[in-house]
Amino acid sequence: MALSDSGLGKSGLGSKGTAVVTTPTDTQILITREFAAPRRSVFRVLTEPELIKKWWSGGFGEVVIAEVDLRVGGRWRYVMTADGHEVGFHGEYREVVPGERFVCTEIYEGVPGGSAPALCSYDLIEEDGRTTLRLLTEMASKEDRDALLASGMEAGAQAGYDILEELAISLPE
């Protein structure tokens, strides 16, 4: 079921995003979004720190830390500030196929004592110069998945992906 159709995940923040958010299982979130840019450009925007700083907050704050060690076993960390609050995530890369795919863990730093890591698989498929991102997030429990959906995640993703697309289009071939 597409969450946008069900009312879950709606924030009313007015994103023009076209990502489709679904829940294939009780512990998964699948986001599918097409970008009007080649795969190599979308991959760069997803993985290069200076580009991540420009889109990851979705315009809802400022990304103050974007660290990426894009290799199997390498770590990443993003932190943004918004309305006097700091929001951070970090994880470790489990698989990297340059320009095509990466798999990483993701841990939200706002849970006292830590949270169970999610496993995020990013797959990029290019056809006719357009790229489809398929992001499958696998959570430890249905409660964790539902908490993420209720957090406004979809609105943030939609807004961030709109900016990501603009950046990817602007990169030189």
Image (spheres, rainbow, N blue to C red):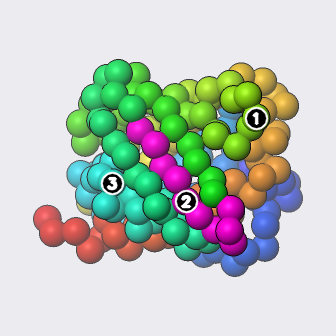
Name above or below for residue 156 compared with residue 44: below
Q: Which residue is mark 2?
A: 80
Residues rendered magenta in the picture? 76-85
Front of the two marks 2 and 1: 1
Q: Are marks 3 and 1 in contact (CB under 8 Å)?
A: no
Q: How many marks?
A: 3
Q: Which residue is mark 1?
A: 112
Helix, strand or loop for disc 2: strand
Assign the magenta stretch its main secondary structure: strand
- Near mark 3 (Cα within 10 A), the count class, few <14, some 14-19 or many ≥20, is some
Name above or below for residue 103 compared with residue 64: above
> Residue at (28%, 29%) from the top-left corner?
71
**Amino acid tagged 2:** Met
Name above or below for residue 154 compared with residue 159: above
Front of the two marks 3 and 1: 1
Quadrant of the snapshot with the N terminus: top right
Q: Is residue 29 left or right of residue 32?
A: right
Q: Is residue 68 left or right of residue 112?
A: left
Q: In front here: 125 or 48?
A: 48
Q: Are marks 2 and 3 in contact (CB under 8 Å)?
A: no
